[in-house]
Image (tube, rainbow, N blue to C red):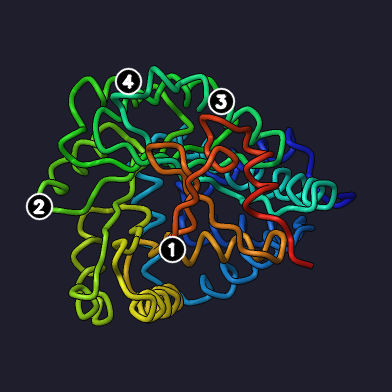
């Protein structure tokens, strides 16, 4: 669009802003948000920066503590690269490309795709995952969420190949080995997301010591409703200094519980009481979709390559990433209804 700042100018502004934020976090981040809003031309950017601008008027916001912590402990190049990849490549340029491709194809295109990866089968299907990302980028998808329950570092070769995309790798604390840290610290477009359990404290401390971007994830069921609603979970989680605290429902979690949890998540963000950004994987991923292109389009591939939409799995060749292209899958599973 005519008001969009060119990529080079965005890079200059963001780098200068990061230096300013280091000197004065409160003033620096407010100035950055104000400038970003001034040059925003898309629905997502305007919506996001308007909300951020309003929230940061609260001088007692716990998010200022989060900002100070991130600026102090995260490698500046990692913060800059990951931020540009999501904020500009994905939610600005990518969002426009998504809307353009949706008009041409007549199907919904998600802003992010979640992929469960079986590390034992990764080498067998590595080219298929590569094809998925390559084609996804052409559609406008530049944010990827990998769920790798074992040996997540196997995905690093893919992440390194696409330095202009942002990757969130969800894994368990036991997977964060010395070798993992050595390989992960090289990647500037990676955010590690650790399962929040009794092993997370020491691992998060190691990630912090290595100046890495990291968050935590927690899988909830009906039994966890109370600790989420009363804030105990977030109060404890913030002690690990994660940027995001990501919630995702168990497969058998009732829909009414998911709705209650998502309402709590949205209110928690507005309250700004915890120095971590609470994110509901299901609800918020859909929210971003609706802001970008009006229709929610949750896309999750399980380890067998079958597409899922949180409620059910489609099991046929037209919905399998090992047998079909992402465009063909979206045309079969995500056609627009209006």
Task: Name which quarter of the figure residue 133 lies in.
Answer: top right
Task: Name which quarter of the figure residue 245 lies in.
Answer: bottom left
- Return the x and y of residue 65 as percentages of the image width and height: 35, 61
Residue drawn at 53 percent across, 51 percent down: 299
Instruction: Determine the CA span between mark 4 and mark 3.
Output: 16 Å
Q: Are marks 2 and 1 in contact (CB under 8 Å)?
A: no
Q: Check disc 3 and report the residue beneath it.
A: 162
Q: Residues within 10 Å of mark 2 (few under 14, many from 20)?
A: few
Residue 198 is labelled as 2
Residue drawn at 52 percent across, 25 percent down: 128
Label 2 sits on a secondary structure element that is loop
Please report whichever mark, 4 or 3, sits nearer to the chain's N-terminal start. Answer: 3
Count of marks overlaid on the render: 4
Label 4 sits on a secondary structure element that is helix
Residue drawn at 51 percent across, 30 percent down: 322
Q: Are marks 4 and 2 in contact (CB under 8 Å)?
A: no
Please report whichever mark, 3 or 1, sits nearer to the chain's N-terminal start. Answer: 3
Instruction: Determine the CA span between mark 4 and mark 1.
Output: 35 Å
Q: Quadrant of the C terminus?
A: bottom right
In this rendering, the label closer to the viewer, 4 or 1:
1
Regarding residue 271, the answer to whether it shows in the image is no
Label 1 sits on a secondary structure element that is loop
Up the image or down, 5 lies above or below 263; here it is above
Classify residue 140 as left or right of residue 120. right
Q: Check disc 4 and report the residue beneath it.
A: 183
Task: Name which quarter of the figure residue 329 lies in.
Answer: top right
């Amino acid at each position: 669009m005519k008001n969009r700042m060119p990529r080079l100018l965005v890079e200059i502004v963001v780098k200068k802003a990061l230096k300013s934020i280091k000197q004065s976090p409160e003033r620096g981040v407010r100035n950055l948000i104000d400038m970003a809003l001034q040059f925003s031309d898309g629905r997502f950017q305007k919506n996001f920066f308007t909300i951020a601008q309003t929230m940061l008027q609260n001088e007692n916001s716990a998010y200022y503590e989060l900002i100070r912590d991130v600026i102090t402990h995260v490698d500046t190049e990692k913060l800059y690269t990951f931020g540009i990849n999501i904020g500009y490549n994905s939610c600005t340029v990518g969002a426009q490309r998504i809307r353009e491709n949706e008009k041409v194809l007549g199907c919904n295109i998600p802003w992010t795709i979640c992929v469960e990866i079986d590390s034992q089968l990764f080498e067998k299907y590595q080219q298929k995952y590569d094809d998925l990302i390559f084609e996804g980028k052409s559609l406008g998808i530049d944010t990827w969420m990998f769920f790798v329950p074992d040996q997540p570092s196997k995905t690093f070769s893919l992440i390194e190949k696409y330095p202009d995309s942002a990757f969130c790798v969800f894994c368990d604390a036991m997977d964060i080995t010395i070798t993992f840290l050595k390989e992960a610290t090289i990647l500037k477009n990676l955010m590690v997301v650790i399962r929040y359990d009794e092993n997370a404290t020491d691992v998060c401390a190691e990630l912090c010591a290595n100046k890495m971007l990291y968050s935590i994830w927690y899988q909830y069921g009906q039994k966890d409703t109370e600790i989420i609603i009363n804030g105990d979970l977030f109060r404890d989680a913030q002690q690990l200094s994660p940027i995001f605290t990501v919630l995702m429902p168990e497969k058998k979690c009732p829909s009414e519980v998911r709705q209650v949890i998502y309402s709590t998540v949205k209110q928690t963000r507005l309250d700004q009481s915890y120095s971590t950004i609470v994110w509901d994987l299901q609800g918020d991923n859909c929210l971003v979709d609706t802001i970008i292109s009006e229709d929610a389009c949750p896309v999750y591939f399980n380890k067998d390559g079958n597409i899922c939409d949180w409620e059910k799995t489609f099991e046929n060749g037209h919905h399998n990433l090992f047998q079909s292209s992402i465009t063909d899958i979206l045309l079969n599973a995500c056609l627009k209804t209006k």
